[in-house]
Every structure is written in C-alpha cells, then in structure tokens.
Amino acid sequence: MRIPLLAGNWKMHKTLSEGSALVEELLAGLGNHTDREVLVCPPYTALAALRPLLENTPIALGAQDVYFEKQGAFTGAIAPAMLVDVGCRYVIVGHSERREVFGDDDATVNRKLHAALEVGLRPIMCVGESKPQRDAGQAEAIVTAQVRAGLHQVSAAQMADVVIAYEPIWAIGTGDTATAADAQAMHAAIRATLNELYGQDVAESVRIQYGGSVKPDNVDELMAQPDIDGALVGGASLKAESFLRIIHFQ
Ligand code: PGA
C-alpha cells in the first residue's frame, strides 16, 4: 500500500512572514486525511522558523537540496545533519533546476542521496527528460538511466526511505503537463526498472511522484493513474487555495 505524498516545492520563494502565513492557511484547510501525506519544502532560510508551526501536525518539513559532505570548508553549502537539526524529514535531490543551473550530475545526485539516507532523511530523487530528448524518442531511456545511476549502491532496505519524482523538464513551470497516460507510462517504466534492480516487493512499495505543472484542474486525473503516487508541486504550492485543492485530490 503506497501512501500518496503531496509535496510543495517552494523553490526560491517566500520570506519568513509569507511562509508562516502560507503554512497557517494550509493547516487550517488541511482536514484530517489519513490516506495521504503532505510535505512542504521551503527555502533553507525558513526551515527553522517553520519547524515549530509544523511540529505535531500532519505536514512534514523538507529541504530542496543538500550537500553530500558532513561538514567543513564548503562555503554556501548545507550538510544533511543540519537539515535533521532543523526538523526536516525529507530532502529533494537532483531537481532539474539543480542539474541545469547548478551542474548536479547523476554521480552528484547519487552522493547526495546516500548522504541523506545516512542521517535518516528521506530523499526525493527527481528524474526527467528534456523536450528534445522526448521528441527524439529517448525519454524512457534517459529517465530509467537516471534512476539506475541515482540509485547506485542503494540497498533494497534503504529503498523504504526513497521517493522518486518523475518531472519532465518541459512540463516544469510551463503549464504544459504530460498527459496522464504519458505520465503513467513513464511511471510504469520506472517501476519496471525498480523491479529489475530490487525485485517486486520493493518496486511495488516505492512511491513515484509526478511533477511538472500539477494544478487543481489536472491533479485528479494524474492521481487516478495506478503508478502515480503523489505530486511534487512548484507554482501551485505557493498559494494555499491551489495546494489545498491538490492535497484534497479525489
Ligand atoms: P511546477 O514545478 O509545478 O511549477 O511546474 C514543479 C517542480 O519543479 O517541482
């Protein structure tokens, strides 16, 4: 039984007061679902301040990235244990913006994933193809290769803490979503890869989120697909009304 995970990736948005206001609104409108999990990933600067608001609530706290070293002379970087220290349960690794803007490659993503697991954080590993790669018919090969490389030397037992997010790059922030059928096909391909790597029990238990222009008006259809186990939401997670509608998917 995979519990859907609805996650808000705030990216580089929200001051402390804006972030607190959003969290208060989310908490007020959340209701008491027991069949889904909710997560917000604010910028680093808001994590410590939001922690007391989220403690003992159904909303978990996560970060948007992490560095793989434990500590040291790495100006500007944040260590995994620091995220635990401010109350994070989850961390996103390998978001396409990290890959494209900051140069993270599959090997870096794999190191970050291991570093997160080592301190008990649950990594959400993002994978996804570009538009030219899709147009060239390479989407599935690219994405499944990212899955294999990102999970290098991750054990079957560790997979209990790993979430995968399929985010086609051309769908992120563009309003252009993959059709539910195309998303489902890729999720099934990712699950088949997990089956090859870890066997059926692990493959059936790992959550695979979809991300890329998830909105109130397309979430129900996406979530109705058998291999879509949640959403990683950017733009529509920045307003309580739209993120709550996504959380309350049918
Ligand atoms: P979007 O972003 O919902 O704004 O497309 C998704 C993401 O990048 O995680």
Image (cartoon, grey):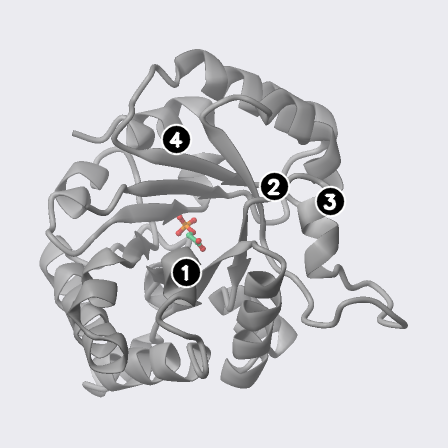
CA gap, disc 1 and disc 4: 23 Å
What residue is disc 2 on? 42
CA gap, disc 2 and disc 3: 15 Å
Whether residues under marks 4 and 3 lie with C-beta atoms below 8 angstroms apart, the answer is: no
Query: At which x and y percent is residue 20?
Result: 64, 23
Residue at the spot 63% in from the left edge and 58% down from the top edge: 119
Residue at the spot 73% in from the left edge and 44% down from the top edge: 85
Q: Nearer the viewer, mark 4 or mark 3?
A: 3
What residue is disc 4 on? 243
Question: Is 232 left, or right, of 224 in this rendering?
Answer: right
**Tag 1: Cα neighbours inside 10 Å, few (<14), some, or many (≥20)?**
many
SS class of the residue under badge 4? Answer: helix
Question: Is 152 left, or right, of 24 in this rendering?
Answer: left
CA gap, disc 1 and disc 3: 20 Å
Query: Which image quadrant: the C terminus?
Result: top left
CA gap, disc 2 and disc 4: 14 Å
Query: In the image shown, does 55 or 64 lie closer to the viewer?
Result: 55
User: Within the image, what quadrant is residue 212 found in?
Assistant: bottom left
What residue is disc 1 on? 162
Query: In the image shown, does 207 or 160 lie closer to the viewer?
Result: 160
